[in-house]
Amino acid sequence: MTVPAAQVFRVPMRHPGDVSGIEALFEAGAAIPAQVVAILAKTEGNGCVNDFTRAYAVQSLEMMLHRHGVTADVALVMSGGTEGGLSPHWIVFAVGEAAAPAPGGALAIASAFTRDFLPEELGRMPQIRETAAAVRAAIAQAGITRAHYVQVKCPLLTNERMADAAARGQSVATTDTYASMGLSRGASALGVALALGEVDEAALSDAVVGEDWSLFSGVASASAGVELTRNEVVVMGMAPGWGGDLAIAHDVMADGIDFPAVQRALAAAGLGAPGQLSEAQQAQAVAVLAKAEPSTTGRIRGARHIMNDDSDINATRHARALVGGVIAAAVGRTELFVSGGAEHQGPDGGGPVAVIVRR
Amino acid sequence: MTVPAAQVFRVPMRHPGDVSGIEALFEAGAAIPAQVVAILAKTEGNGCVNDFTRAYAVQSLEMMLHRHGVTADVALVMSGGTEGGLSPHWIVFAVGEAAAPAPGGALAIASAFTRDFLPEELGRMPQIRETAAAVRAAIAQAGITRAHYVQVKCPLLTNERMADAAARGQSVATTDTYASMGLSRGASALGVALALGEVDEAALSDAVVGEDWSLFSGVASASAGVELTRNEVVVMGMAPGWGGDLAIAHDVMADGIDFPAVQRALAAAGLGAPGQLSEAQQAQAVAVLAKAEPSTTGRIRGARHIMNDDSDINATRHARALVGGVIAAAVGRTELFVSGGAEHQGPDGGGPVAVIVRR
Amino acid sequence: MTVPAAQVFRVPMRHPGDVSGIEALFEAGAAIPAQVVAILAKTEGNGCVNDFTRAYAVQSLEMMLHRHGVTADVALVMSGGTEGGLSPHWIVFAVGEAAAPAPGGALAIASAFTRDFLPEELGRMPQIRETAAAVRAAIAQAGITRAHYVQVKCPLLTNERMADAAARGQSVATTDTYASMGLSRGASALGVALALGEVDEAALSDAVVGEDWSLFSGVASASAGVELTRNEVVVMGMAPGWGGDLAIAHDVMADGIDFPAVQRALAAAGLGAPGQLSEAQQAQAVAVLAKAEPSTTGRIRGARHIMNDDSDINATRHARALVGGVIAAAVGRTELFVSGGAEHQGPDGGGPVAVIVRR
Amino acid sequence: MTVPAAQVFRVPMRHPGDVSGIEALFEAGAAIPAQVVAILAKTEGNGCVNDFTRAYAVQSLEMMLHRHGVTADVALVMSGGTEGGLSPHWIVFAVGEAAAPAPGGALAIASAFTRDFLPEELGRMPQIRETAAAVRAAIAQAGITRAHYVQVKCPLLTNERMADAAARGQSVATTDTYASMGLSRGASALGVALALGEVDEAALSDAVVGEDWSLFSGVASASAGVELTRNEVVVMGMAPGWGGDLAIAHDVMADGIDFPAVQRALAAAGLGAPGQLSEAQQAQAVAVLAKAEPSTTGRIRGARHIMNDDSDINATRHARALVGGVIAAAVGRTELFVSGGAEHQGPDGGGPVAVIVRR
């Protein structure tokens, strides 16, 4: 009798269509195609509206997985933007088997889906509640006792969907497509917060989404994609029944230069260090996942930043570059999954940071 | 009888023309206009060819200094580019008086100039040798026993200057105006290295400028400006004969994420810390000055960066954002003078970092 | 006895602080400093939030005018953004004297101001009505019988002004500073339309500003500036009582590639041509002033444009480059005053184009 | 007995992976997959180093062609950059059959390839001569009597190829990968010029490539791609033996605003017009193909442009936006194949413009 065991592979890419590193893992037998459950990536686009590196990477992954006989759904989460020193890379998540549970439990991964949303539900309470239900279902399924990172992919409002709602006499949360991405991410994050008890249901309403930044999840990471009509949820956490040598921990950066929070997350994962990780510790730090956002106040600890006023470089690009530098200072590496668009994912100007380690 | 004493003021700006913070210092009597010797600034332009925030800031400073009766030469060094979280700010350097030297010496500041250069001398040995002589002169003048930061402003080749050289039958180091900025900065930095014994004169030649990155200064910070025909040098270091409560130290970042080097520089200045500075230490850290550059290898510790391949954001902008994040991680603040264009200023992909502290 | 006569000088600039071309006009006696009433310019910034080339140009102009003894108010309208082939340049407007009116009248220029606005009036009917009154006053003052170009500078909502309104229990049109620029420009343009009978007062309300793009002026060109608390209006048109050899005409581009409208405007000014102007005609075309905007539909004559989806280059930058190319095709020159931000200034995706000619 | 007949389809795309419009042509029977010989496209990337929209479009095309059973080589030429108003679109070239030659001949299309190049041959005479031979071969094969547009895809120097040359003791034309793209395009264009008698062989040498801009082809359009080791040539011209209703003509823009040259090209193709094409003429103008480049002088007809000094927007992006506007002014449409990187393809700052019409 065996137990599930998570595997995580960090793989460099030479360009957004370069899946050769993942194929090499398959060919070497290090990873089994059929066991892959999710692939995250940082690709080198602008991470904004016209970032086609994400779709190109997805197309390349799908062709590659098809070549390797993978027919099951694999969650593909592409995050554009490798500003500053961030290095484009894939993170492959697989679930294999171990002979016995690890003492104290191990990293567990589980997915779940909501039902399809009506356009008028996006960015509002129905999306929050359904996301919370999906998170609870994934947690229950994997026996997770502590969730440390919850990746959500969520829909957005297109002109077609807004027209559909209007035809049925329904209002939508916003008529601005770009704004709907933020509202959908925000409602998804609040759904995570609701499921994990980070926020009281009584504090939630349609009105707080995108408005009350004091409400947030410290483990949610949400991205919106036009191809979706429902939320996809991938929960990572510690589960007593899982085997393998991986563990996960997290903390929350209070602002973009909250280096102590990064150090706390590393220490919680067993990688305590006075300053940058040692080389041995760096090898143990399999993956680091974080969210970055410019503060809406235009300030970091009282000093003005120019992210929100720069019409040449999008604010989220500045934020990723900054947070990438701060986390690289701690970890000693630039292959870091730092993603933008952190509505209700950590406090204003801050965000969650999760660490997956090999023990 | 008195001794000289350096003063350093870090002043926020709301925009590149906002000198009101400096004027407030004058009006409060905290700083004396006639004692100002240099003003450095980070302004929020792109730091590249068409960055007019620097000229706008200089024009605003000159008008303001004129209003306050300053007639002496004040070195004005504007560095464009506050990417990531970097905060636009002024750093005002003044030289006042103290009753007696500080025990162990104190921060000293001294300026010197080379003779005017012929176009054919730029980026070549004559610029290197004359810069070295100016650095030595400044050091001697102030009695500096250890130089920790040498700011150089240097000329570049314009079409007119190239035509002048051609008319006299002389070749120039490059016929590309933009490239001449790098060569002039590089030769200037090698001049600093020569003066301080960081590089042997025998190792220097016209051919190594812009080519042999193993030759560099660990304290030089050079910027090229079209308005100059000679090099201006400002040396900061420790001098036994100076008073006041300021000190300076430095170290050299080996790459863009060399957090330990930043910690060493802080510790050398008396601000040792396991991780980020405490609030009390932050208050002591009056100014931090550093250079940032993308590595020419396209790698940071083996991981690919995209700085040199990004046709939307200039490579130096990525580099400043990254290094700004790494230093902010250590210092706990984003008002940091991180400047790009680091040819022969620190190793390839790295750069000097200097810290001025109040003891 | 004399009559007023307008003069217009188009002057190249080497950078946003280069006012030497204007000074050369003064020194040659071609222009008289005390007769200058307005200076417009295209500067090479991004034309968006962090475009400091405008403030730098204004500061340079003010210093220069002060050096030449000008004490009267001169309207300074800096428009950032010389994308595509547009060439940075100044346009100096002066009012001198002529012995007699020109047959059929001549170009006339007149300025007027509204009262100061309360924050809650911006982007709403009070701004519309007061702007209309100022336009009418300027027209009456100069005896203009046909207005062809109305430049308006208008305030925007800052955080301080919004707080002031809130403290008095008043709502504002928007709480987004950037959005307030568009609403203020839009209300100003509708004020021009109201004054000139282009739009019925009955069709106007707070609600149409920034919403009903079918309402617009075909001659308004508005820009918002943080330094203003009232609207400044400069009307250019034909007046029977004015002398000199200049005339003005205009037409309205229906979309960004409405070359026939440009040809019509030129022909109305006496410069009819099958294709590009001849060299002799080009010399007569003293100034061309136009507005450019991306269509909100994302289409130009049915074909998709990417202006609104480009997160690397602001949409208004694309629009200026396009319209600059279309007008240069007709005029045969790239010194064209093509300005962005055309809310209610021409139809959606189009805009006014005015031509000043020497007869 | 039949003769060959060219078909050209202009197809909009919603994003770089959207090949649905081409598939719709196949499904409707309007185009036959097996007859497709080339597909050109304008995609909405930056057209520079990190433009992955080209590779994404190619991958999408290859998957689609495979789905439709196409096994033959189809020349795929993706040109990134739809600045200003340019509209992303595909142009599909097919060769079918007609019952008889068209009177006066018709548009003919023919492809040819050079042998593989050694690294040391790129950007030099061997590449020029082999390209010329390939152009001559294609012309002979199709019986073309007048070539109006020659598309060339050519290799570039990678670090691996440079190392290979060095290992064999051979020098290369440049050690800068990016510069090698320009040299390879330039040598390819000079090869076209040599084949067509636009330039004398005696005037050619390694030294003129990338240096003597007075030597150029008025019909060449070259693009460099890392995947190639030889030149691929597609010649379009008029051939007496071809049938169908299409024809082609061209002219050469002397600078970026040479609207008369565009009008001449249209007139040569039978679409003479005083100003913009009529709607009926627009429908006849099946495809317009042009090259755009910033002038190296920094001037357009004496007026300064800022393309070469803009560190936020690449110079070629400005140039495409400008030329797109000028050509749209003439054609009345924004679906125009305006491509950058025009070394030796037209004069400095100008470029060829070709028009394919349905008669």
Image (tube, coloured by chain):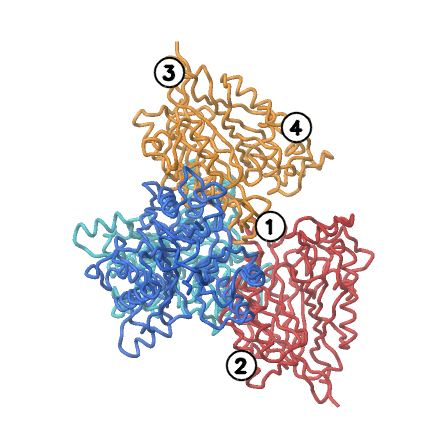
Chain colours: A orange, B blue, C red, D cyan
| Real-space CA distance between mark 2 and mark 3, rounded to the nearest whole angstrom | 84 Å
Residue to which mark 4 is pinned: A126
* Label 2 crowd bin: few (<14), some (14–19), many (20+), radius 10 Å: few
Report, in whole angstroms, how far the alpha carbon at label 4 lies from the one at label 1: 31 Å
In front of the other: label 2 or label 1? 2
Of marks 4 and 3, which one's residue comes earlier in the chain?
A: 3
Question: For this rendering, which residue is in front, B135 or D93?
Answer: B135
From the image, tell me which residue sits under label 2. C24
Which percent across, then down, holds residue B274? 41, 37
For the residues carrying marks 4 and 3, which lies nearer the camera in this image?
3
The residue wearing badge 1 is C298
CA distance separating discs 2 and 1: 45 Å
Question: For the residue marked with disc 4, what is the amino acid?
Answer: Pro
Lateral position of residue D213 relative to residue A255, left or right? left
Q: Are marks 2 and 1 on the same chain?
A: yes
Query: What residue would you read off at disc 3?
Result: A98
Chain under numbered label 3: A
- Residue D97, given in percent of the width and then of the height, sits at 43, 49
- Tag 3 and tag 1 share a subunit: no
Which residue sits at x=40%, y=15%?
A: A103
Letter of the chain that mark 1 sits on in the rendering:
C
Kindly check if marks 2 and 1 are in contact, taking CB atoms under 8 A apart as contact. Answer: no
Q: Is residue D46 visible?
A: no
The chain letter under disc 2 is C
Q: Secondary structure at mark 4?
A: helix
